[in-house]
Image: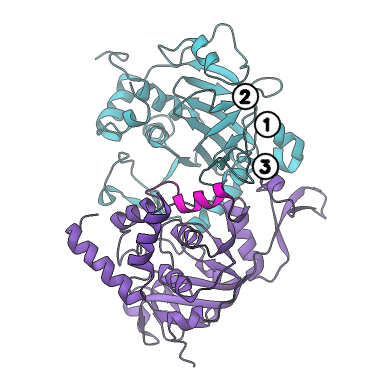
Amino acid sequence: MSADEGVTRAEVCAVACAEAWRGDGEVMASPFGTIPAVGARLARLTFAPDLVLTDGEAALMANTPGVSARRDELVLEAWMPYRRVFDVVWSGRRHIMMMASQVDRYGNQNLSAIGDWARPKAQLIGVRGAPGNSVNHTTSYWVPAHSPRSFVEHVDMVCGVGYDRAAAAGPAATRFHEVRVVVSNLGVFDFDTPDHAMRLRSVHPGVTVDEVVAATGFALVLPDPVPVTRAPTVDELELVREVLDPRRLRDKEVAS
Amino acid sequence: MSDKRTSLDDMVGELRDGMTVGFGGWGSRRKPMAAVRAVLRSGVRDLTVVAYGGPDVGVLCAAGRVRKVVYGFVTLDSIALDPHFRAARQQGTIEAMEVDEGMFYLGLLAAAQRLPFLPTRAGLGSDVLRVNPGLKTVRSPYDDGEELVAMPALTLDAAFVHVNRADTHGNGQVLGPDPFFDELFLGAAVRRFLTAENVVEPGGLLHHGPIQTVTVSRLLTDAVAEAPGGAHFTSCPPDYDRDEGFQRRYAAAAADPDAWAAFDARYLQADEAGYRAAVDEDTATDGGAS
């Protein structure tokens, strides 16, 4: 098997998500969504062995089972009830990858409501921990359906705080603020620009820059040339396919 | 020591229209649903509901008992969004105070510690401050001079919490993995109500689990009621899992007013025994499948 033989978009996305945690050391990785969950596990099994992973309830896992593992397959290493999660959040020893119903040019994120918050067109889950996460520790986002409705000029409700809003709020907001990357089904995006405007870091194999631009509701910063997101290695593919997601739940989030 | 046992209806009988009431648990997990059902029977209305929101919020919204919800999220976990809460928000029938879930924690903690506020970074730069114009910031009096959010105390007129076991003095035991923020809901409240799957004699809790599982001390409770299935249809491990089949019926009842009326008539008009009988009948019909 060569590394790029039959590789699906979902598998490219899983590796791109895993890359978000590269170099983080001993922090709690909190992935939301199937593909980020595969990615965080993949990172721990390969280049980020010190990552701390939760079981989705109130414990940390010593082993790295697949995303559809049964409870009795988990080996637990420590207690982490929700109240203690806030100790971790506020200590900064965490890198979360949240979903974003909307994300904008400066990395503001919305998962609260679409339309006017006072009487929304669509009430979503609520701000959750996004405001606190984004000003306390590294935050990344996962958008499985990249479109002009999800990549917008201005989000309807700022939940996760982007670079412009953090700067406007002052040093207490910027001190620990970092939006690392946004991973979508089309590419990887970062804010490594002079004014922290979103940049297209790479397009996934088979995606054109024009497709990304057309699917984005604001002007992206475009390097020239735009790199291609790296393909999974043979070892990574085997881990994803055999160990981490043998039931192919990833394909339900991003179709091939 | 006093025996704090009472009935659900007597607990809820202390509520008045317009009160601010907190409910423990998290999402669709270990919610004091028997207490919520008792609130529905009581007729009390115009409540400000404070919760890490799950179907407690949705049921009370659907039944028209809510003036305002204070929350960081509302979810049914296995169903991402509660359709009853969504409808109330989208139709504009309720007021909302939406804050970061860590701010929410600090609001309860401030109330429990009788402080006016606690400082936090959470909320800075976000629209939480825009949509809650009453929230203020505070400047650190120390050399750092940081400008932080001053999360005000979320003081409650009453709080309801459901645990696995309690004793007659009002100590409460959580045998599942997460005690959530139940101690803080009780600590933040003027009247503090504990319900439990079983109520045992004082000293009996240690037959069920180690001392660390007794997370609610009687210092935090005014009354205790035995409520078997008191978290149903939310999860209450290790006693029972979430009743996913029932939760789907609950969500589907948001489809239209007739669907809600049928759900209400079947499950919520009766007392707690009637509710359990209807649920048992469903389980028999479903063959226990959920």
The CA distance from mark 2 to mark 1 is 9 Å
Q: Is residue A133 magenta?
A: no
Quarter of the rendering containing residue A7: top left
Give the class, few, some or many, for how many residues have Cα within 10 Å of label 2's Cα (few <14, many ≥20): many
Q: Position of residue A127 (x, y in %)?
A: 57, 46
Q: Up-down: is A76 above or below B24?
A: above
B189 sits left or right of B238 in the view = right
Residue at mark 1: A163
The residue lying at 29 percent from left, 33 percent from top is A245
Toward the bottom, the furthest residue is: B1
A42 sits left or right of A218 in the view = left
Residue at mark 2: A191
Residue at mark 3: B126
Judged from the image, the secondary structure of the residue bearing numbered disc 1 is helix
Tell me, by letter, which chain the rendering colours cyan: A
Near-viewer residue (A12 or A185): A185
**Contact? badges 2 and 1 (CB < 8 Å):** yes
Q: Position of residue B20 (x, y in %)?
A: 61, 68
Near-viewer residue (B191 or A122): A122
Q: Position of residue B127 (x, y in %)?
A: 67, 43
Q: Amino acid at mark 3?
A: Ser
Please report whichever mark, 2 or 1, sits nearer to the chain's N-terminal start: 1
Start-end of magenta stretch: B77-92
Q: Amino acid at mark 1?
A: Tyr
Q: Can you tell which of label 3 and label 2 is closer to the viewer? A: 3
